[in-house]
Structure formats: C-alpha cells, structure tokens
C-alpha cells in the first residue's frame, strides 16, 4: 500500500507465525519489537546540526551508528543532537512494545513520533526547565539549580556557573 514515508513510497507487510513449544521463566508474551527505516536529507554544503526528538523509542541508528537515549515516555526533554554532513542519512529505529512499561490492556500498537529540528544557535537553554530552591527574603535556600542546556556544537562545552542579577545566595 502507499506510504507517506517517501515520495512514491510503498510499504509491504509479511505475516509470520511463531510456533513455540515452551516458554522460559521471565518471557514477556505481550512484548513486540520491530525495525523501521527512514532517511534524513541534509542539503547544507557544510552539514547541519539536527535535534532528533524520538518519542516512543529507546534506540536507533544513524548511518549504522547506534544511539541510545530515545524518548520512550515522550517527555521531549533531551533530544539527541547530531552533526550531519551533506547528503542522505539512513535512520533505523527499533520499535518496542513493552508490556511492563505500557500495560497489556490495550491493543498491541507501537506508536512513535520522530521530529528532526534544525539547530542554528550554539546552545539551546530551556528556561521553562529551570529548577531552583525556594526564595526567602530575597535569598535562595541553597546554591543548587538545574536547567536543560543543549550543546549544538561538535565540541564539548563546560558550564562553570549560573548566576542571576536579581537573587543572591
């Protein structure tokens, strides 16, 4: 049948039946695994930095290189940042239906969302993710804070301090 995965794309299905004479302890009967393939096209001559949001996935491969840290529970907090050269890149995704995580009450459907976002800035700072202690009489309760910072550069970045002009310790 026709597929929206590519121009003039088509999808074919195979029906397989497993005959299992016995099961071993710990076998999850309602868990399913499959692989799907797609492609990322980069047209920039110098390559492009891409943030991949992989909701519903645990692992995937880009050009055969394995990446863990997909977003199985769809929190959309930590995309995988890739620096891709010009050309077409193969994206292989491991689809998983884990009854331990997703329950077994519904139909055994695997749902994933894949979003590729171009990144132009060196750093992305998610101001909505900021966590700090309570402020009492204009002072923070302690010196600890947490904020999501995504490095879009190919080199490592070290964050050595955070400060606010409005609040003192």
Image (spheres, rainbow, N blue to C red):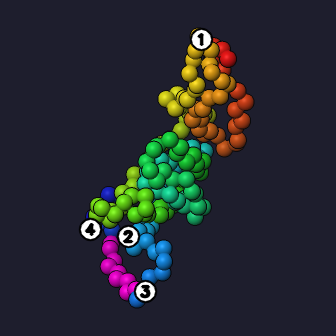
For the residues labelled 3 and 2, the Cα–Cα distance comes to 15 Å
Identify residue for label 2: 30
Q: What quarter of the picture does the N terminus occupy?
A: bottom left
Q: Which of the labelled discs sits on residue 138, or is there none?
A: 1
> In the displayed structure, would residue 158 be above or below residue 163?
below
Are the two marked residues, 4 and 1, in contact with CB atoms closer than 8 angstroms? no
The image quadrant of residue 145 is top right
Q: In the image, which residues are magenta?
A: 12-20
Q: Earlier in the sequence, mark 2 or mark 4?
A: 4
Dot 4 alpha-carbon crowd within 10 angstroms: few under 14, some 14 to 19, many 20 or more: few
Q: Earlier in the sequence, mark 1 or mark 3?
A: 3
146 and 86: which is toward the camera: 146
Residue beneath the point at 29% across and 61% down: 106
Lateral position of residue 168 relative to residue 20, left or right: right
Residue beneath the point at 43% across and 62% down: 100
For the residues labelled 4 and 1, the Cα–Cα distance comes to 63 Å
Q: Which of the labelled discs sits on residue 1, or is there none?
A: 4
Q: Earlier in the sequence, mark 3 or mark 2?
A: 3
Residue at the bottom extreme? 21
Identify residue for label 3: 22
For the residues labelled 2 and 4, the Cα–Cα distance comes to 27 Å
Magenta segment, prevailing SS (helix, strand or loop) = loop
Residue beneath the point at 58% across and 64% down: 64
> In the displayed structure, would residue 16 be above or below residue 10?
below
Lateral position of residue 107 relative to residue 125, left or right: left
For the residues labelled 3 and 4, the Cα–Cα distance comes to 36 Å
Q: What quarter of the picture does the C terminus occupy?
A: top right
For the residues labelled 1 and 2, the Cα–Cα distance comes to 54 Å
Q: Secondary structure at mark 3?
A: loop
Asked if the magenta segment contains residue 29, the reply would be: no
Q: Secondary structure at mark 1?
A: loop
């Amino acid at each position: 049948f026709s597929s929206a995965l590519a121009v003039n794309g088509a999808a074919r299905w195979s029906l397989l039946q497993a005959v299992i004479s016995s099961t071993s302890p710990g076998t999850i009967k309602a868990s399913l695994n499959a692989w799907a393939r797609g492609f990322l096209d980069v047209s920039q001559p110098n390559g492009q930095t891409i943030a991949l949001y992989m909701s519903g996935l645990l692992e995937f491969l880009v050009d055969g290189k394995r990446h863990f840290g997909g977003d199985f529970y769809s929190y959309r907090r930590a995309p995988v940042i890739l620096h891709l050269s010009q050309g077409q890149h193969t994206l292989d995704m491991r689809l998983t239906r884990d009854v331990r995580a997703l329950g077994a009450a519904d139909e055994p459907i695997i749902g994933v969302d894949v979003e590729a976002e171009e990144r132009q800035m060196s750093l992305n700072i998610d101001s909505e993710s900021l966590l700090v202690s309570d402020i009492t009489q204009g002072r923070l309760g302690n010196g600890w804070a947490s904020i999501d910072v995504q490095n879009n550069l190919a080199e490592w970045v070290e964050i050595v301090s955070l400060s606010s002009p409005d609040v003192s310790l």
